[in-house]
Image: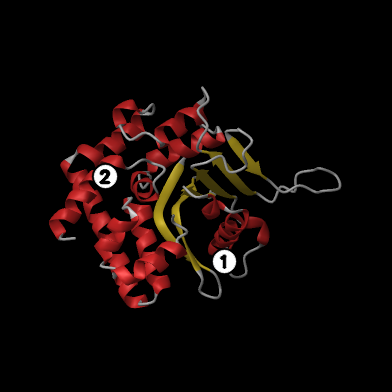
């Protein structure tokens, strides 16, 4: 695939992007006001003020294993919010939520600091499907004392958002917008304005093109560096998830040999 054809496809993909797509979500929600609106809707906290937002933030544990957070936000009380969009259930597993939560604590803890000053943390998974399958808009995970039923109140919170929910309330309106390709049909003016900028404004579209090109280059570099089928499979999956390439388009773009494709398809559990 030459550069002209790749750009044409990327431009077409940009018009198909939705906020549930992690590449697009991390760009739109770099905006502090957009992230503040999101958290306010989910927590029903109109008084909440976001003061800092980071996208694609890498956090590492003591052994060097890292996780890349889609969005990491801080409010004016010092509380931390990790917001993730997950289109596949395996990306939103219970232990992934636990791991992200533990990394937030490790990230903010200072040597010699009393445990009681640890900031309140929220890990929020917005999932394309109803992860728990109960039809509820939100699923709050909190610790309780099993014998008494009392809240443990350690200020660690995990929240799953049902992307399929379309109720006539704030969460329903928000999920409608997360799955909407056309900014003219979105219900939140602030989100619509940001989506419109990245899809129709010349400067915004070019910014998305640059980000998409960087993803493509990283995928190619990873595939070449790994050399093995596992490395190539990860690079193919990155293009499929981030730029919505088909399996064949991703393989063509990364120049994966035909002889390797069947094995990669099997690794990715594609039919």
Give how far across and how far down residue 89 sits, in percent.
54, 50
Tell me the SS state at disc 1: loop
Q: Nearer the viewer, mark 2 or mark 1?
A: 2
In the displayed structure image, the side of residue 63 where residue 198 appears, left or right: left
Q: Position of residue 16 (x, y in %)?
A: 30, 41
Tell me, for residue 110, which label it has, or none.
1
Q: Could you tell me residue 38's position as x and y percent? A: 46, 38
Q: Nearer the viewer, residue 171 or 92?
A: 92
Q: Is residue 98 visible?
A: yes
Residue 182, numbered circle: none
In this orientation, which residue lies closer to the viewer: 270 or 118? Answer: 270
Residue beneath label 2, please? 14
* Farthest residue, direction right: 147
User: In the rendered view of the protein, which quadrant contains the N terminus?
Assistant: bottom left
Q: Is residue 262 above or below residue 131?
A: below
Q: Residue at x 34, y 28 (%)?
A: 189
Position above or below: 19 against 255: above
């Amino acid at each position: 695939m030459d550069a002209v054809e790749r750009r044409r496809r990327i431009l077409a993909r940009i018009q198909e992007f939705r906020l549930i797509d992690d590449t697009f979500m991390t760009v739109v929600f770099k905006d502090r006001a957009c992230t503040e609106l999101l958290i306010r809707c989910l927590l029903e906290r109109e008084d909440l003020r976001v003061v800092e937002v980071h996208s694609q933030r890498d956090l590492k544990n003591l052994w060097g294993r890292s996780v890349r957070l889609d969005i990491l936000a801080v409010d004016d009380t010092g509380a931390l919010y990790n917001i993730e969009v997950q289109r596949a259930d395996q990306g939103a597993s219970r232990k992934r939520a636990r791991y992200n939560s533990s990394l937030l604590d490790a990230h903010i803890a200072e040597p010699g600091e009393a445990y009681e000053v640890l900031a309140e943390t929220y890990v929020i998974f917005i999932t394309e499907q109803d992860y728990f399958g109960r039809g509820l808009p939100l699923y709050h995970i909190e610790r309780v004392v099993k014998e008494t039923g009392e809240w443990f109140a350690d200020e660690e919170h995990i929240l799953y958002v049902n992307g399929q929910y379309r109720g006539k309330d704030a969460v329903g309106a928000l999920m409608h917008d997360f799955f909407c390709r056309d900014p003219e049909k979105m219900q939140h003016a602030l989100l619509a304005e940001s989506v419109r900028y990245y899809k129709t404004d010349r400067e915004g579209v070019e910014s998305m093109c640059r980000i998409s090109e960087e993803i493509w280059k990283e995928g190619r570099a990873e595939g070449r560096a790994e050399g093995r089928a596992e490395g190539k499979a990860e690079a193919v999956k990155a293009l499929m998830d981030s730029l919505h390439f088909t399996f064949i388009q991703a393989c063509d773009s990364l120049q994966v040999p035909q002889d390797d494709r069947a094995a990669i398809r099997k690794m990715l559990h594609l039919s």
